Image: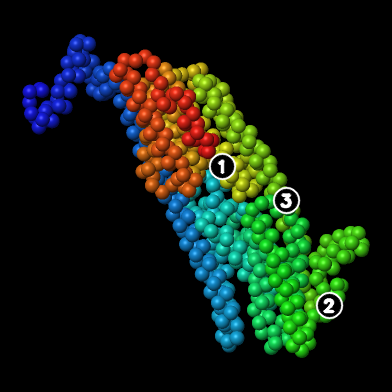
């Protein structure tokens, strides 16, 4: 064989290996009988040595798992990506409809056909909003509809009123509430209530009353705050023509009083840090703008001889915010709980839906209590999942299984009922619990398989990667992929432990498993945002494991019994540092 040329050897090399394997088998075992050959025909690999057969079966199992996992995740990711794109497109359509309405109000107000144009644009906007609200694919409704929403008929999906919106639609709904509140104030001089007809949509089935709120409490409050800023801008615009507009002062005073009363109502809320809190903090600047415009107009009127612009009001007739504070100091009590109606000039009135805003405040306080309860309970679930991973590294499979079951029980019995009531709380602490649980569940299955009664301890990993639909809890693709990426860190720590006892086959299994996970992530292509940043960490983990395997091979070739790799010398600190941010 070695006397032939390179081109001849290229064709003879596979046949030479085949003859060598057959020759070795004949030397170690007698020729099989006819019955044995028939039995071996049903299991082609049964005549191979046990170690070679086990490695081949493990590789085939990992290849099948990788392909099946990739196909399953591709379907989920494609559906979620399509849904987000459609929701984003709908958000653009809503934004365009809002802009068209604003343009119609500005340009068509003085034309004879202006009212018809405004009515047509407003009707088109209302229809688009109601169509968006009724579409179940514009929501993240995983809490109530489950993770496999793409398999359901849209008519079969019942969306929770508090389900989070997708693709920026929530911001467009805030703009819708802002637009409606501004137009209602300009027409009626009052603040639009949250249960106004324009904020209610009829529903086919669903709730008993057949009615559904178009906007949430947070969207209404954000819209009202935005209206305050719009009043400031509108007041500046009207003040530009103050010399010819006799009603400009009365309008700006009415707008100032409205913003003052709204600020007084918002002051009763205990906003936590977030977008709504930041918007609330900006409301005082809208009030300052209106007060500054009034002052400047009064000064200009006095200097220029425009008596209509001069503001003459006492404390009792002025800013209602200041007047209520003085009343509280004088009487020692708070204003009445009924709707606040401020009389101005004897014939102008401004009504604030104080009772409805008070109900929003009560619901907001209740949701804050649910959030605090969920955060405290999530700590217990995440602690159980982390302790399960520590137990697996110690070889205590029984305790790890018990802790994972405890984490499942916390999620199903304590956390899910809260999410059923308030689905917006699914992200954050709860998502962290699920990701930690997935990491522990995947690591347990990778070590021991999915047997109901695991061994007490084991130094040989099975290498099985649990698929998404094999996990008992309802998970999103992001939850599963986050735990799958973190699994490579636990596999790396296990590889360091196997390397210290010179288990080269165990290290090889760790390398193959991490490579399979890395290739799966690469084949998926577009990943959730929080998962994308973990792909680089997985790649570094694979590189370190390959280095461990390489140095194990060096030790084997040199015949040395004691050999510490760079990773082993650090005691696994490299993997701990690599995944410190994820765990």
Colouring: rainbow
Query: What element does badge 1 sit on?
Result: helix
Q: Which mark is residue 431?
A: 1
x, y percent for residue 315:
86, 72
> Which circle's residue, 2 or 1, is located before the other in the chain?
2
Q: Is residue 510 visible?
A: yes
522 and 309: which is toward the camera = 309
**Which tag is nearer the camera, tag 3 or tag 2?**
2
- Report how far apart the C-alphas of labels 1 and 3 lie in the structure: 23 Å
Q: Is residue 445 visible?
A: no
The residue pinned by badge 3 equals: 365
Q: Residue at x 46, y 50 (%)?
A: 80
Residue 324's place in the image compared with 106, above or below, is above
x, y percent for residue 274:
64, 53
144 and 56: which is toward the camera = 56
> Which circle's residue, 3 or 2, is located before the other in the chain?
2
- Report how far apart the C-alphas of labels 3 and 2 lie in the structure: 38 Å
Residue 303's place in the image compared with 545, above or below, is below
Q: Looking at the image, do the residues carrying marks 1 and 3 touch, with CB atoms under 8 Å apart?
A: no
**Which tag is nearer the camera, tag 2 or tag 1?**
2
Q: Is residue 259 left or right of residue 174?
A: right
The residue pinned by badge 2 equals: 313
Query: What element does badge 3 sit on?
Result: helix
39 and 488: which is toward the camera = 488
x, y percent for residue 366:
72, 49
Quadrant occupied by the N terminus = top left
Residue 258's place in the image compared with 216, above or below, is below
Q: Residue at x 56, y 63 (%)?
A: 172
Q: Is residue 303 left or right of residue 574?
A: right
């Amino acid at each position: 064989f070695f006397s032939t040329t390179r081109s001849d050897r290229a064709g003879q090399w596979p046949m030479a290996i085949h003859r060598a394997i057959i020759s070795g088998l004949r030397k170690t075992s007698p020729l099989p009988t006819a019955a044995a050959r028939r039995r071996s025909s049903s299991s082609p690999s049964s005549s191979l040595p046990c170690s070679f057969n086990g490695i081949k079966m493990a590789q085939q199992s990992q290849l099948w798992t990788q392909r099946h996992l990739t196909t399953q995740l591709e379907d989920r990711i494609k559906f979620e990506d399509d849904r987000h794109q459609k929701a984003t497109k709908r958000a653009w359509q809503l934004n365009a409809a809002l802009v068209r309405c604003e343009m119609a109000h500005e340009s068509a107000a003085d034309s004879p056909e202006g009212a018809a144009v405004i009515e047509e644009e407003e009707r088109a906007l209302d229809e688009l909003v109601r169509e968006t609200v009724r579409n179940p694919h514009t929501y993240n409704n995983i809490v109530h509809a489950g993770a496999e929403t793409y398999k359901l008929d849209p008519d079969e999906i019942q969306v929770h009123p508090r389900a989070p919106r997708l693709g920026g639609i929530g911001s467009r709904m805030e703009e819708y509430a802002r637009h409606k509140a501004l137009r209602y104030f300009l027409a009626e001089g009052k603040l639009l209530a949250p249960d106004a007809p324009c904020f209610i949509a009829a529903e086919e089935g669903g709730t008993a009353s057949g009615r559904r709120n178009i906007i949430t409490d947070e969207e209404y409050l954000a819209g009202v705050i935005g209206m305050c800023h719009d009043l400031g801008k509108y007041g500046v615009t009207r003040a530009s023509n103050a010399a010819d507009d006799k009603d400009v002062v009365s309008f700006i005073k009415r707008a100032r009083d409205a913003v003052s009363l709204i600020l007084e109502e918002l002051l009763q809320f205990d906003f936590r840090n977030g977008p709504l809190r930041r918007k609330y903090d900006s409301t005082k600047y809208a009030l300052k703008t209106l007060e500054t415009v009034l002052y400047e107009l009064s000064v200009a009127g006095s200097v220029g001889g425009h008596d209509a612009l001069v503001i003459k009001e006492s404390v009792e007739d002025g800013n209602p915010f200041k007047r209520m504070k003085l009343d509280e100091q004088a009487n020692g009590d708070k204003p009445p709980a009924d709707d606040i109606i401020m009389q101005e000039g004897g014939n102008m009135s401004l009504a604030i839906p104080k009772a409805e805003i008070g109900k929003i405040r009560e619901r907001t306080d209740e949701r804050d209590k649910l959030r605090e309860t969920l955060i405290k309970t999530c700590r217990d679930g995440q602690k159980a999942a982390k302790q399960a991973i520590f137990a697996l590294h110690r070889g205590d499979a029984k305790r790890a299984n018990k802790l994972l079951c405890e984490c499942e029980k916390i999620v199903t019995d304590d956390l899910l009922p809260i999410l059923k009531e308030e689905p917006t709380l699914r992200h954050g602490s709860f998502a962290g619990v699920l990701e930690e649980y997935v990491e522990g569940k995947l690591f347990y299955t990778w070590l021991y398989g999915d047997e109901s009664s695991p061994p007490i301890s084991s130094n040989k990993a099975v290498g099985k990667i649990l698929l998404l639909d094999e996990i008992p809890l309802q998970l999103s693709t992001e939850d599963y992929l986050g735990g799958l990426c973190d699994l490579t860190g636990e596999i790396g720590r296990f590889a360091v432990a196997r390397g210290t006892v010179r288990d080269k086959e165990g290290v090889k299994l760790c390398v193959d498993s991490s490579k399979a996970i890395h290739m799966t992530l690469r084949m998926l292509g577009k990943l959730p945002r929080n998962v994308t940043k973990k792909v680089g960490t997985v790649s570094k983990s694979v590189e370190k494991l390959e280095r461990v395997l390489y140095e194990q091979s060096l030790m084997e070739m040199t015949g040395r019994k004691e050999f510490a790799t760079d990773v082993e010398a650090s005691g696994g600190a490299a993997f701990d540092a690599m995944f410190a941010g994820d765990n």
